Amino acid sequence: MIWQFPPIRFYIHSNNSLYASNLACDTINTVTSFFTSVADLEILPNGDMWVCASRNLLFSSDHGQSWVTRFTLTSGDFYKIRMFADGTGYVIDGSIYKTTDHGNTWTKLGFNPYSIFDFDFYDRNNGFVIGSYGKIHRTRDGGIYFEQLNLAGMTNTNAVFCLDSLNIFISGTKVYSTYDGGMIWKENLFEGIPAGPGNMAALHMFDHSNGIYVGQHAPIWRTYNRGNTPVELSSFSAVSLGNKVALQWTTETETNNMGFEIERRYKHSDWKTITFSKGSGTSTRKIYYGYDDYEPKAPCILYYRLKQIDYNGTFEYSKEVEVIFGEVPEDYAIQQNYPNPFNPSTKINFSLPEENKVVIRVFNPMGELVQEINRGTLSHGYFEQDIEMGSNPSGMYFCQVLCTNTKTERTKSLTIKMVLMK
């Protein structure tokens, strides 16, 4: 284990020795040697040191030059300790002990459902313990009460690391982390290991983004983004509101996020970038984004996606979202042409509840086709069509709107009578 204190010195402990070095690590000096193996080292901001040395809990107030025994077990060994500046501390040997007077006296806590494998606290009252059978318990009152946590998919839980009140990591066959104090837990990602790296030997986060993970039977990984995707998009939606489409999206975390290009396409058309929304760089808090698109004209079916771009130029697309823009008719319908009678042109109006391929045909009383208009593929909505018949003789005509559903391939015919009077 390596500890940095103060900013110009490193402390390193091996199985039974404590060493010190400068930042360059060009010299490493032995501070002291212990007669028994060292399982854990804790250094407080004021320089006080604590060591779990087999069955003894040792304390030094002179940077490790001399040590005194503060707690001795009758059986078993200490293997992890956490101390806080106000004098509160915790240590485990399979059970958990607590001190509130800088380690002068220790009290065994009443947590006894399981033997404790690991634990960590981020302040004097709040922490987690990992028990046998992979059980995870949390305390918010300094160990008076422990509540059990259940993480879906987590098995063989063996280790926990607390960076602060919001950022906590729990490891087993997979590694889960939370950035909101435990409301939401997410599975961390490991390159080339889809199922996770196996049980954790050690994990340390230097800050909210950078950390190192060591597996018990696996290589060492380093993360620059808390073990998750650089920009974690938790939601993306598009809603039709009056004369606009309102886009909203949320990120849980961001790393080097320059921003988002918003892309839109109509059905059967290509993607088009419509605007750019600046990102938040690097952040561990939830961030909400929004954009109102006023350009589309109803009715239509639209698709949107986000192109998230890092400062180094790499990018990733979100999933597409679909929105129906404009009123959706309940059924197929055609209205009587207006004006009627007419000379030489008239208008017809028809409605489609779904996407259809539309062809408009005009027949004379003998059933002969006199005019055909191919409208192509139309989405749901209300439509208008001008019909010009100046070259046709007066009389009654039939106007037919043929609608072929693009999903079912079924064709529906809508027909009205029209009178051309010259």
Image (cartoon, rainbow, N blue to C red):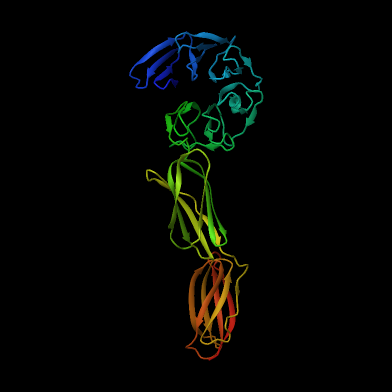
- Residue 131 image-quadrant placement: top right
Vertically, is 109 above or below 371?
Answer: above
Residue 392: give x, y in percent of width and height.
Answer: 49, 89
Vertically, is 135 above or below 328?
Answer: above
Q: Residue at x 43, y 31 (%)?
A: 221
Left or right: residue 394 compared with residue 225: right
Q: Which of 391 and 210 is in front in this view?
A: 210
Residue 404: give x, y in percent of width and height.
Answer: 54, 70
Residue 49: give x, y in percent of width and height.
Answer: 49, 15
Q: Which residue is drawn at 55% across and 33% down?
A: 166
Vertically, is 169 above or below 108?
Answer: below
| Quadrant location of the N terminus in the rendered image | top left
How many callouts does the rendering have?
0
Q: Which residue is drawn at 52% across and 8% down?
A: 68
- Residue 128 image-quadrant placement: top right
Vertically, is 203 above or below 307?
Answer: above
- Residue 75 image-quadrant placement: top right
Q: Residue at x 66, y 23 (%)?
A: 144
Residue 142: give x, y in percent of width and height.
Answer: 62, 23
